[in-house]
Amino acid sequence: MNQEQWTAMDEFLTSQLLPQDTALDAALEASTQAGLPAINVAPNQGKLLNLLAKLRGARRILEVGTLGGYSTIWLARALPADGRLVSLEVDAAHAQVARANVERAGLSKTVSVVLGPAAQTLEQFVADSAEPFDMIFLDADKRSYPEYLRLSLQLSRPGTLIVADNVIRRGQVADHASTDPDVIGLHAFFRQLATNPRLDSTAVQTVGVKGWDGFSMTLVSN
């Protein structure tokens, strides 16, 4: 198997199961025109996030890493009318594109894009005793995943679902001797998942239009 076959398979699945969507297509096009990196989730991965949020019955979602707001739109569409999604983005240009994409999708009343370093924003949420989130999606710099997880747990309740993207990194995470800061961060992240008694976790590797990668899923208990 190779990248060409993985991409063809993703395109088949998307064509069969996901109808054409003007707002999502426009979000991708606007992101490309603005020069944002093409690291958004694939369409079928976005739909998976949407279904997970619906299955969880999420009313409040936290997203760490907005980029152009593509996954933000998928997640926000799973919320009830009174639901809220808060997305954290460190890059002002990315946040500007994301806000425009969210507005075009008719979700401005549901979504807040907060600009600033995610760890600082999360610390402020904790200090402010923010209402816990039902679902948390981590999709930012991998070296900081341990810190994002630590702070996210303080913003969780029993039953909170935490999904972390890009945790396989073309198999590099299996290299225990790696000196890559992102891989080192993910090693620490997996140790947290494995040793924290509050967490019940698994991880799945995937192939597709985004190459060889994967995600982890964690259910928070008491």
Image: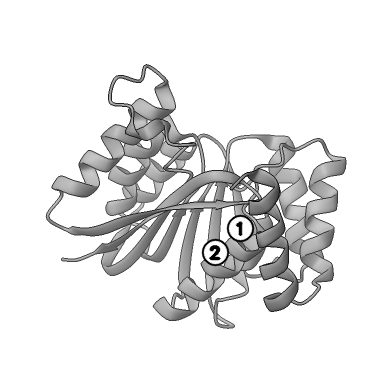
Q: Measure the C-alpha gap from mark 2 to mark 1.
A: 6 Å
- Label 1 Cα crowd, 10 Å radius (few <14 / some 14-19 / many 20+): some
Inspect this view and state whether residue 107 appears.
Answer: no
Q: Image quarter for residue 176? A: top left
x and y percentages locating residue 15 in the rendered image: 75, 71
Inspect this view and state whether residue 151 appears.
Answer: yes
- Label 2 Cα crowd, 10 Å radius (few <14 / some 14-19 / many 20+): many
Q: Which mark is residue 1?
A: none
Q: Secondary structure at mark 2?
A: strand
Horizontal relation, residue 55 to residue 101: left or right = left
Given the image, on which type of amino acid does mark 2 rest? Leu
Whether 136 is drawn above or below 31: the answer is below
Given the image, on which type of amino acid does mark 1 rest? Ser
- Give the residue furthest to the front: 1
Q: Image quarter for residue 82? A: bottom right
x and y percentages locating residue 81 in the rendered image: 59, 83
User: What residue is rendered at 21% in x and 39% in y?
Assistant: 191
- Give the residue furthest to the right: 33
Q: Which mark is residue 112?
A: 1
Give the position of the C terminus as an image quadrant.
bottom left
- Give the residue furthest to the top: 179
User: What residue is rendered at 33% in x and 27% in y?
Assistant: 175
Residue corresponding to mark 2: 85
